[in-house]
């Protein structure tokens, strides 16, 4: 059973520990900066919504949803100019698994599939994810969860591979 609970201030120390782990450091920024971004989300200075995902009641990782329209024209967008190439009504997702021992077991795929269902139920039609193309484990998990490369953006996004979830519900 996969569930999502909003991140609270009580989670900050746990997240700081997770973000300092080698498998996180490889793909995320400096832990202190990343934790501060999450604090900004908790306190409403950033519209990104952070969640802890749980598997069978145990905290297993972090997932967030961000809104393209809210990132346009920000400092963040200066570092990621490809944001201007995305539909303003799209949402983006980021995910990381807490413990390295849980990698490559299908958890990321299952969590993303469940989270995408939640986002679709909330009315989000365009869902994107932007892994580093060198993170082959993540790219594979995202493909398995139904994300596909956005062909029009290949080669235009520097160190990000833009992928969109393909909604196949109701398609025969």
Image: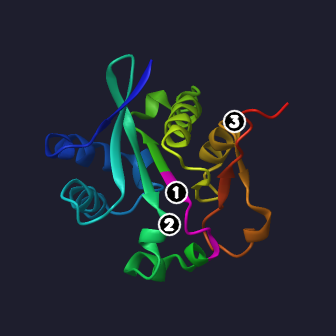
- Mark toward the start of the polypeptide (1 vs 2): 2
Q: Position of residue 40 (x, y in %)?
A: 23, 62
Residue where numbered disc 1 is placed? 91
* Label placed on residue 126: none
- Mark toward the start of the polypeptide (3 vs 1): 1
Q: Position of residue 11 (x, y in %)?
A: 20, 41
Q: Are marks 1 and 2 in contact (CB under 8 Å)?
A: yes
Choose between 44 and 23: the one closer to the eye: 44
Q: Residue at x 48, y 70 (%)?
A: 69
Task: Name the image colouring.
Answer: rainbow
Is the residue marked by circle 2 packed among few (<14), some (14-19), or many (20+) residues within 10 Å? Answer: many
Choose between 125 and 13: the one closer to the eye: 125
Residue where numbered disc 2 is placed? 68
* Label placed on residue 144: 3
Q: Residue at x 18, y 58 (%)?
A: 43
As displayed, is residue 64 above or below residue 53?
below
Is residue 70 among what the camera can see? yes
State the CA–CA distance, disc 3 to disc 1.
19 Å
As displayed, is residue 101 above or below residue 72?
above
Circle 1 — which element? Answer: strand
Is residue 98 among what the camera can see? no
- Mark toward the start of the polypeptide (3 vs 2): 2
Q: Which residues are magenta?
A: 85-93
Q: Position of residue 139 (x, y in %)?
A: 65, 47
As displayed, is residue 35 above or below residue 45?
above
């Amino acid at each position: 059973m996969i569930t999502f609970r909003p991140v609270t201030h009580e989670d900050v120390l746990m997240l700081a520990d997770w973000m300092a782990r080698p498998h996180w450091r490889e793909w995320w920024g400096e832990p202190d900066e990343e934790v501060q971004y999450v604090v900004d989300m908790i306190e409403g200075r950033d519209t990104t919504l952070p969640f802890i995902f749980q598997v069978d009641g145990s905290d297993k990782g972090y997932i967030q949803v961000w809104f393209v329209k809210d990132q346009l024209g920000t400092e963040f967008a200066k570092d990621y100019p490809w944001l201007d190439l995305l539909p303003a009504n799209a949402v983006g997702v980021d995910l990381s698994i807490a413990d390295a021992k849980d990698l490559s077991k299908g958890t990321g795929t299952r969590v993303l599939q469940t989270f995408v269902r939640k986002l679709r139920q909330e009315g989000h039609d365009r869902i994107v994810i932007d892994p580093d193309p060198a993170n082959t484990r993540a790219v594979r998990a995202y493909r398995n969860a139904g994300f596909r490369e956005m062909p029009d953006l290949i080669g235009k996004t520097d160190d990000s591979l833009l992928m969109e979830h393909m909604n196949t519900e109701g398609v025969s």
